[in-house]
Amino acid sequence: MNIQAASRHTPQPAPEVGQPVTRNANAHHELSIRVRDLSLWYGETQALNKLNIDIYQKNVTALIGPSGCGKSTFLRCLNRMNDLIPGVSIRGLVEMDGRDVNAVKMDEVALRRRVGMVFQKPNPFPKSIYENVAYAPRMHDLVSRKSEQDELVEHALREAGLWNEVKDKLHQPGTSLSGGQQQRLCIARAIAVQPDVILMDEPTSALDPISTATIEDLMDKLKKQFTIITVTHNMQQAARVADYTAFFHLGEIIEYNDTQMMFSSPATKKAEDYITGRYG
Amino acid sequence: MQTNQIFMLFCGILLLMGLVAYFAGRARATGVRASGTAMYAQPDQYAWFAVLATAGPALLVSALGAFIMLLLGATIPVPYLLAASLAVAAAGLLVGIVQVRPDFHARQAIERAIRWVLVSAAMISIFTTFGILFSIVFEALRFFQMHSFWEFITGTVWAPGNSFLAAAGRADDAASAARFGSVPLFAGTFLITAIAMLVAIPVGLLSAIYMAEFAPRRVRTLAKPTLEVLAGIPTVVYGFFAAITVAPIIVNVAGALGLDASFNNALAPGIVMGIMIIPFISSLSDDVINAVPDSMRQGSLALGMTKGETIRDVVIPAALPGIISASLLAVSRALGETMIVVMAAGMRPNLTANPLEEMTTVTVRIVAALTGDLEFESAETLSAFALGLVLFAVTLSLNLVSVLMIRRFREKYRVNNL
Amino acid sequence: MSQSFDDISAQLRKRHRKSARLKWFSMGALGLAGLFLVLFFTDMLNKGLPAFQQAQIQVQVDYSEQASQIPLAAVEEEVRDLVSRGFLRTIPLRMKNDPELLGVQRSEWVLADGQVDQYLKGHANKLRDDARERVDRLAAEGRVALKFNTTFFTRGDSKMPELAGIMSAAVGTVMTMLVTLAIAFPIGVMTALYLEEFAPDNRLTQIIEININNLAAIPSILFGLLGLAIFINFFGVPRSTPLVGGMTLALMTLPVIIISTRTALRSVPDSIRHAAFGVGCSRWQVVRDHVLPLAMPGIMTGSIIGLAQAMGETAPLIIVGMVAFIPDVGASFTQAATVLPAQVFTWSGEPDRAFIEKTAGGILVLLTILIFLNATAVILRKKFERRW
């Protein structure tokens, strides 16, 4: 096994900056987010070191790596959720739609509308199921009439695969649902805003296996419309849902590869060791 | 003087007996131990048990005697009572010494006694509540024997000053009979409370929002204790401030606007009371807003909401039970506030909605009824207790509702420091 | 499907403005609360600081035979109505106590009348025009001046503003607080110990807990009613005394001490208790030797805060009659007394305008003590705060 693995580490032509080592033939390759030399510090501590990665539209990109390696921090750079933490400084380029996301002129609220997020723990608002979904589109003027709003809520809940379970109790509080249902409600909430990108920060780590499977199916379905970037601790999950996988280690991207290749014949020793469970 | 000396003598003898008990018990226990017998407890513990056995029952007997004298009105001569106590103490001393035996659990006995002492201390708070309740209810009932409860609750004229006329045989004279209709008092109380809340809730809540959501750390650590200073100022000081500084300002401003304001207007005590209550609301609301989990805020921001929208539509609704609970407590405090209204509001019951007019409150009338030279049995004095009863009932229910609401909030977000 | 950043930003402009408005409003609210505080303190300092100075007048005092009969004769006619009657009244007594004074003529700085004092401070006063002229002339000669007001700190209440002081009220406060602390501290700590360390989780315990929380929120005036009906009328405790006042305030302070003691006990981690149980301590020994010493700073802090609260309380004391006129410093717990806030209340009701500054002066003293107490509590907490 080890010998075989070692043999795979024959020097390959280095990929261009930010590009995956191997191309996934089935994946889309229109650029969604381009990251160049992105570094981030929490006060004095450097958490990200010169990251380069191109993320493609309408794919699922998984970020894996040992805990504390910066994957969540990186994810939160993409919609500037790190702004909320005092003492964070960022250098480098995160480009979306030809615009620098971190530019002073960039309105982070506008950014977050195009880059939605689903969190580790389901966090529905203390409102009704209906309101949880309808609230943001209404505020964003995406709907003007009550009927449109009803339609949008139904559409989002259907997309999230939750409609059949909640259609009779739309006006009960969102917190009355089970954990897996709550997480799907949060996904429906994110979909309803019609973003381009949905960031998922370990979306299933707080859920049971059945709910996890449901959400994985959902991700597979949603990637037809949205670019999905997901952080996961669970390598099987990355293998199941992702088109591309990036391996993070100590604040750097060690390997960015087609998921199949990443798990069958990783290009780097570190990724190989992590995937085979040497550490992590 | 005589009694005092006897009392000192009693205390001295008891102390002496305690000392004897300690050293005798200790010496005996040390002796037993020296003889090689294993004992359940340390010599010190036997000694303390002996002290306890000496002083405890004796003090109990004297306290019981004092209580019987007060409660049943029986007269037991003090020297006899104290002598009896000393006899009990002597008996206790003997028992304490005899009990110094290897097979006696002195430590357990002491700890049982300590436990009882602690339990009785804990019961005092219950007694206090019942004391308040009984003292008020009992005197209020006497008042309601003189004047109808219905008139008290629904009457719109409060004219207790005439109660002496009843004694002069002119009770039938409708114009001069004492009237105890509490509606104008409660109207005044509620109006002043409402003014206070109009000041305290917006300012307090917004301050809390600023401190919890916007303020940089340094401002926050400075602002919170500074606001608490407002809560630490004695109410009598606020009363003076309202009467001497705020009321004239209001009269002048009203005059400039062509309005006529009394120097005892309801606005001055209301506003000042509101200022006093600001930290109460801001501090509790700040805690509650901070207890709203950050994941709520992030969930909203990640949907492309502005910070203001997040606060208005997500944070505040989530914190609402706590905020309401804080406001109810604040209302209850404003209703029972005494010094500010005594010093700055009027004495004349006045049923009006105009805050520039003079009006009076429940607490003002309670103070007025109890500080004059009236005898305790008069209807006016007793009316204070009837008013107190209503005040007690209202504040108690507000507190209970508030406690229930905060408990619900706490269970929802599993925070324990509220 | 999706809009460009510019489109979205354009739509957001109004919403951003609203958000900013909330920020400014809330900042303004905090500023307003701060402004109240500043206004309040400036007002109190403005009104109260003059009370620490009192007009004195330099006069030729003639301790003659006649003066021991008619004190007015001791000073020149020109200043008779400008000198405090309080000073003149003491002349015969002083001459009786000190026979050597007879025949002495000397220049002394003596207390001026309250109206002169008010005139010098530029407040409204009842001096006649000719008296004002005389004061102006004396002031020009340096024979009338404002000097530090020792009377205010060394004397009791008086109907003459220039002689009124806070000493008797301060002593009354100390005695009342001693009673309060002697009752509330042991009972409060014992109750908290029972509830935290010994009580089983049953109905009775829950009732006690709810009851304590309620007690903390009952209006203070109702404690006054309790004191009046139970302590005075039922148990016959003498009215207006530090004893009854202290007992009443003790019941009021009890919940504060209980609640803070419980918090302090709870902050001692269970591992300490387990360790002590592990070496064979009984429950009481664990509490006495391990938990209580660790919780002590917290208990002290809570008690000081409770004490400060009780010290500023007036309403229940009015009901139990502690607003008496007390010119002399009290000596016993069963003599009529008054306390600082009650003294403030009494003075604020005096019609003489000179008492306004006395009231504010008393308030400043009261506030200084309270700030000192609270600062002590804060320092105590900072110093002994321990994170487990």
Image: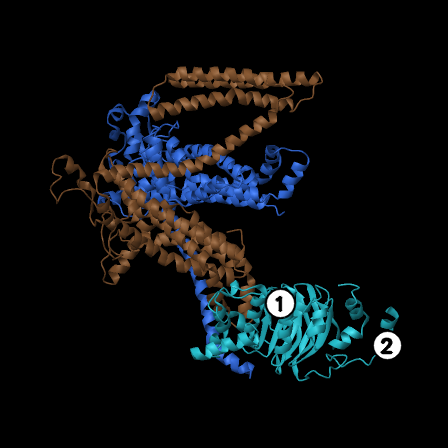
Chain colours: A cyan, B brown, C blue
State the image coordinates of residue A46 (x, y, percent, origin top left): 70, 66
Give the answer, above or below, for where B358 lies relative to A129: above
State the image coordinates of residue C340 (x, y, percent, origin top left): 38, 38
C139 or B8, nearer to the observer: B8
Check chain identity for marks 2 and 1: say if they share one: yes
Q: Looking at numbered disc 1 in the image, what kind of residue is underneath it? A: Ser
A143 or B185, nearer to the observer: A143
Which chain does the residue under circle 2 lie in?
A
Residue receiving disc 2: A10
Which of the labelled discs sits on residue A211, or is there none? 1
Mark 1, other Cα within 10 Å: few <14 / some 14–19 / many ≥20:
some
Give the answer, above or below, for where B214 lies relative to B283: below
Q: CA distance from mark 2 to mark 1?
A: 41 Å
Q: Looking at numbered disc 2 in the image, what kind of residue is underneath it? A: Thr
**In terms of secondary structure, where does tag 1 sit?**
helix
**Residue at image x 23%, y 62%?**
B258
Image quadrant assignment for residue B129: top left
Q: Is residue C354 left or right of residue B279?
A: left
Residue C82 appears anywhere in the view: no
**Along the polypeptide, which appears first: circle 2 or circle 1?**
2
The number of numbered badges drawn on the structure is 2
Mark 2, other Cα within 10 Å: few <14 / some 14–19 / many ≥20:
few
State the image coordinates of residue B27 (x, y, percent, origin top left): 63, 16
